[in-house]
Amino acid sequence: MRIDVITIFPDYLAPLSLSLVGKAIEAGIVDLAVHDLRWWTHDRHHTTDDTPYGGGAGMVMKPEPWGEAMDAMEHLNPAPMTVVVPTPTGRVLDQDLAHELSTRERLVFACGRYEGIDQRVLDHCAESYELIEVSLGDYVLNGGEVAVLAITEAMVRLIPGVIGNPDSLVEESHAPGHRLLEYPNYTKPPVWRGRQVPPVLLSGNHAAIATWRREQALERTRQRRPDLFQNGS
């Protein structure tokens, strides 16, 4: 997979070189590049935003640098582009969307700031490429960079070869097929500060352990996310 990220704060994306995403890059599973939007500005101040037509507070990111950036991305790599724009008005990120994105050959993340990117840029992307607008939830961040970190980690870990043991993806929260929250997990020691690991987990009875985990997942989902049952879990 090829990932390009366009932002006015390239250093914000440094954590992508760490942990599993970094290992996927080192292994050649993911090819990632971060680009400074200001490369495609032509005034001495490297201006990327201006006041909104119609008035109102805040600034809007200008279409010219974004248009040139997208043209450059198109010529940089022949693979079909899926442009991902983090925005509070987008489709809420969930495991289904993470799986969907993990199947794409090439993603270009466009990190907006202020009041967002001029709508004409998004319209152009929708006509020229595949455009997916993504929200992390019902709240607002200062820009798209934090969202790109979250989306990339959620997606890259699903690419075959990134997670050492693919079975670990099967029973985790929101995994396809059951939509339940994951059961509680425990490790050594068996007793810590007077709190014991549930005896069934020490029994070696795999059928009983599977039943316990299923019951715990159901109960945790009922208590914390009953909406998942309403959505067909």
Image (tube, rainbow, N blue to C red):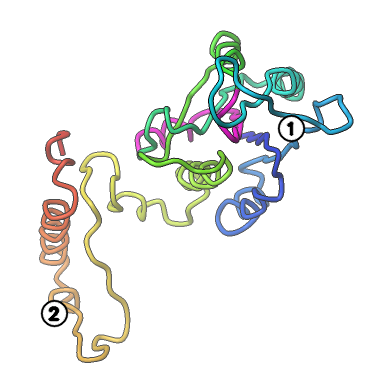
- Residue that label 2 marks: 199
Q: Quadrant of residue 50?
A: top right
Pinpoint residue 134: horizontal percent, then vertical percent.
45, 31
Pinpoint residue 185: horizontal percent, then vertical percent.
27, 68
Q: Residue at x 51, y 33 (%)?
A: 86
Q: Quadrant of residue 126?
A: top right
Q: Secondary structure at mark 2?
A: helix
Q: Quadrant of residue 174?
A: top left
Q: Pick whichever, 172 or 134, lies toward us.
A: 134
Image quarter in which the N terminus is found: top right
Mark 1 nearby-residue class (10 Å; few <14, some 14–19, many ≥20): many
Three-letter amino acid code at the position of disc 2: Pro
Q: Pick whichever, 223 or 199, lies toward us.
A: 223
Residue 37: image tag: 1
Q: Residue at x 20, y 85 (%)?
A: 195
Magenta-highlighted residues? 95-117
Residue 2 lies left or right of residue 77; in this view the side is left
Q: How many callouts does the rendering have?
A: 2
Q: Residue at x 53, y 25 (%)?
A: 56
Residue 115 colored in magenta in the image: yes
Whether residue 13 can be seen here: yes
Q: Pick whichever, 190 or 107, lies toward us.
A: 107
Residue 90: image tag: none
